[in-house]
Amino acid sequence: MKRVPPSVQTKAAIDELLAGGAEGAEDARSTLLRLAVQYIVEEALEAKTGELLGRDYYEHGARQEGDGDASRGHRNGYRRGHLASAEGEISFASPQVRGIDAGALKALRERLAGRTEGLEDLAVEMFARGCSTRDIEAIFQGEDGTALLSKRAAAELTERLWAEYEAFATRDLGAIKPLYLFIDGVAERLTPGFKREAVLCAWAITWDGRKVLLHLAPGRKESTECCKDFIEDMQRRGLDAPVLVATDGAAGLIRAVEDCFPTALRQRCLAHKMRNIAAKLPEDIRAEFEAAAKASYHAPSPAMARALSEDLVERFERQAPTAVRCFEEDFEACIAQLQLPVVHRRVARTTNLLERLFGETRRRSKVAPTVAGERPVLKMLYAAAIRASDSWKGIRIGELERRQLERLQTQLNQHAKEESASAVNMTSTPQRSNHPPAKPGALNA
């Protein structure tokens, strides 16, 4: 079998992870970051080795004058190197050479050992928007500013990393079967003097319980048009409709989800909703009101949730009318998760796995170099995204839960067909209900 450089093997591992493989990975985002750093280091070391030897991995060396049959230096296998990073130890394969001075290769390895944060940023850049030659050269510099990679080697590495970025941004999503989809957006002023930039991020929990990063893209704002473009890009790449989509309360995102996924339940993020409610409550009744709201949102069934919501409105309408209106607004979307199997409701009712983006993004923005146009908000947010949810595990989907979800999906599909047929016979389309009509044995009883 033909031998391949270790970087090619690392690339295959990245491809498997992005395709939803690598079963057993506790944290796919952390694994992706470690593999990406490993890949960059191995590619850089291969580029440096090729530069020293005057030939790439698969090329044979030309005979040098006075050397007889010997070529100028040769490869002598690999040894393992290690980097300490925020994501844990990163192991990489370092080429060994004979017949030439390997001091430059050693200097590059030693320099990389102290630049793990920069390497992680570069890994993020690789997937978020590709890397420029300037990005590569900035990382692979000595303490005195001298280049550890030649411009040619840096340019070649840039081209390879750009190809990796394009593969991520355009990869086929058809093999990923989303059960629950989470979409959120954030706008941050990462550079003083510049306007806030919006970025949309999408994750999914698949039918086999795995977590998968689907898409990350910049947008001017969370308008319906921008959000629809974001979702439709995933659909063009083969993404199927999920059973449930969780979002915040942005009107543009809500309309885009309902237009693009007419058969899916829409779940309003309860973490966002509870914060909105709390901001409108007087201090003396806040704890009591919040407890009542949570009791409704976490009720055993949608029917019970509606009964508890009526009780809340009756108790607090006079004391906190603004908070009551906020509670009632989009209520059906807040309890959509109650139609799911009980064991899945907690993970489906918020976009908390994306919430960690905010604090991480702000922290990184304070230490990142300010270079307008070179390291935009997208890179920062991707860095946060692949670090997020360190403690989040995949969910278990047993046979009972699978049957319940398949039945619910059938109901939702039928409900969408009936609603579509009804719209054809009416002069105006009725407002979409967020729950299918009750049926014998249905989860929404």
Image (cartoon, rainbow, N blue to C red):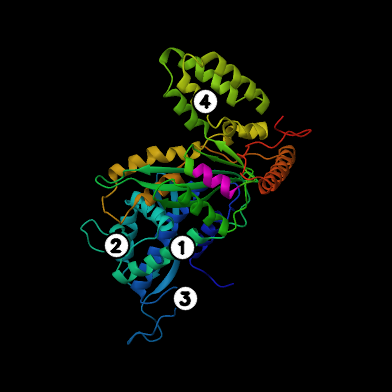
Near mark 1 (Cα within 10 A), the count class, few <14, some 14-19 or many ≥20, is some
* Farthest left residue in view: 144
Residue 290: numbered disc: none
Q: Mark 1: which amino acid?
A: Glu
Q: CA distance from mark 2 to mark 4?
A: 51 Å
Q: CA distance from mark 1 to mark 2?
A: 19 Å
Q: Mark 4: which amino acid?
A: Phe
Question: Circle 2 — which element?
Answer: helix
Q: Is residue 36 above or below residue 330?
A: below
Residue 403 image position (x, y, % from top left): 75, 40
Residue 390 in view here: no
- Magenta span: helix, strand or loop, mainly? helix
Which residue is disc 2 drawn over? 134
Q: Mark 3: which amino acid?
A: Tyr
Which residue is disc 1 drawn over? 166
Question: Circle 1 — which element?
Answer: helix
Q: Is residue 39 above or below residue 66?
A: above
- Residue occupying the point 45% across, 55% down: 36
Residue 227 image position (x, y, % from top left): 48, 49
Residue 327: numbered disc: 4
Residue 169 image position (x, y, % from top left): 48, 59
Q: Mark 2: which amino acid?
A: Arg
